Amino acid sequence: MSNRVGAELCSNEMDVITNSSSRRNSESLPYLHKVGLPPKQSLLKEIAGTVKETFFADDPLRNFKDQSRSRKLVLGVQAIFPIFEWGRHYSLSKFKGDLIAGLTLASLVIPQDFGYAKLANLDPQYGLYSSFVPPLVYAFMGTSRELAIGPVAMVSLLLGTLLQEELDPIKNKVDYRRLAFTATFFAGITQATLGFFRLGFLIDFLSHAAIVGFMAGAAVTISLQQLKGLLGIKKFTKNTDIVSVMRSVWSSVHHGWNWQTILIGVSFLAFLMLAKYIGKKKKKLFWVAAIAPLISVILSTFFVYITRADKHGVQIVKNIRKGINPPSVDQIFFSGEYLAKGFRIGLVAGMIALTEAVSIGRTFASMKSYQLDGNKEMVALGTMNIVGSMTSCFLTTGGFARSAVNCMAGCNTAVSNIVMSSVVFLTLKFITPLFKYTPSAVLASIIISAVIGLIDFEAVCLIWKIDKFDFVACMGAFFGVVFISVEIGLLIAVSISFAKILLQVTRPRTAILGKLPRTTVYRSIFQYPDATKVPGILIVRVDSAIYFSNSNYVKERILRWLADEVENLKEHSQPRIQYLIVEMSPVTDIDTSGIHALEELFMILEKRDVKLVLANPGPVVVDKLHASKFQELIGEDRIFLTVADAVMTCAPKLELVP
């Protein structure tokens, strides 16, 4: 009995040992996962998925799911007018912050608006009009808490430059103003359309580097244009390039400059720059820089009035029309020769204004850790410009300087825009006659001090360090604006941005991979010099989708890698290449031309007695390879999940002969 029990125990122990041994052996053997084929989708589902990811990636209708009809109506109103959503939680403590921010903002923008209207070649009151109606519309429809709405230097200059190419702002003042309203109307239509059809990704085609260069060039151009007011020159060139401006300045040095004007302009420019320096050095004193323009206007106006400097050649603003915005629907060109011109100008200026506002809004949203809805922003900006064009406003957007002041002053919501707009309303209603004796030199000083901040030296240095091609785009836009014109600079910026995209698409990066020591990881031998090549195997990675635009280049680049490697191996009498592994994990997509290039590569390699192997193709690529039956041509056993699997399988088969 005991012997039988002992025998059974020994037998069980042997079974356990055998099982554990076999398990260890099976674990030691490499198990190669096959590349999975994704489930087949119908054409309709594939198109629907692509459209959804392109236009509705944020799933805007998710809040409407499983809601009652009345609730859907409320959500719909809140989607169009976000103020009804966040307004439910508005409190007195938030209003205190918005009130201070709005009042501080108004003290900055009122004097600036006079100058920006001047940049657009319009009367001063139109700058105030544009800081009254559009901010109210944006407050109801916008999603940014910090974005401060009104005329900005760069857009005003661009609009004025494009408009005066069509009409003389002095000789044909009425039609010029009508064309400005028409351009503003179509700018708003463009912006709202982009947002409504969720085409906001189009503005991302203008690179950050190009925008930095364009804004810096615009800042230099705007500053040069202000020399007319700063020096008291009456006859001045209409061109914006630096050569024409400096020629105009120096040609009038003996008979056109006014020393009283220069004294006023330079003195207040120094005061404004000092205030700006104090506000930048000590963040708590930001309000010093914010109210400095208003103090400058008050003091200079009082000085000119009591000394009657206007009778000694000092140019003044003169009469500013009192009262709120008059309607201007009947002044927009809806037909005739200026319709197309207004549309073209509005399209260009509207896109630039949109790019500036969205980028500034995103910057402050990321600082405050909340999400900004880009498409809603575009609809809001477009709507406010459409309404603005019908109420005597020219093109407005969100400005960085005023938004920064708004943020530092403690704004909590878009109510700060409403407060600012209310102050502008009171100014239009009661105070505008007091600005009659404001000297043009002070407005020039305010504009110069405001636009200097558009020149971002740190950003330019960072662009140089990160990407030299981006630096070329930045400098191209800058010199185009400064030495030719604003629109040419813009064209250069867009062209270089598109050229970079085309270059990246048509000439994707490729790399030779090697094995990192003591790992099964394969990385670029250029990035990791200690990575070693596998004898008899060349591993190449393609870092882009393979399309018709780059398929031929990818094939030829791989063959060049192979030719260089073969030549190098011959020189050192090492074994020849028998396998070429293409790492395809970065290849997000492939088209018919790309597959045809792979077929050609396969045929060429077969003639050279080199086997083509693919590693880690993505689901889209695998699906298209199977649809084209490329896997039958190459063989299922030559498509692997990882490079390590491919090397593990191919290495034992190598015939290591030179």
Image: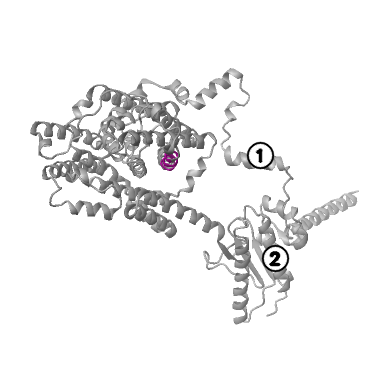
Nearest to the observer: residue 83 or residue 439 = 439
Count of numbered badges drawn on the protein: 2
Q: Secondary structure at mark 1?
A: helix
* Residue 111, magenta (yes or no): no
Q: Identify the image's colour scheme: rainbow, by chain, secondary structure or one colour.
A: one colour
Nearest to the observer: residue 279 or residue 641 = 279
Residue 541 lies, with reference to residue 283, above or below; the image says below
User: What is the magenta range?
Assistant: 341-350
Residue extending farthest to the top is 70
- Label 1, label 2: how many angstroms apart (C-alpha)? 33 Å
Name the residue type under label 1.
Ala
Question: Label for residue 251?
Answer: none
Across and down, in percent, residue 645 comes to 69, 61
Majority secondary structure of magenta residues: helix
The residue where tag 1 is placed is: 48
Query: Which residue appears at 78% of the width and 59% of the height?
Result: 632
Is any part of residue 412 visible from this angle? no
Across and down, in percent, residue 80 comes to 50, 26
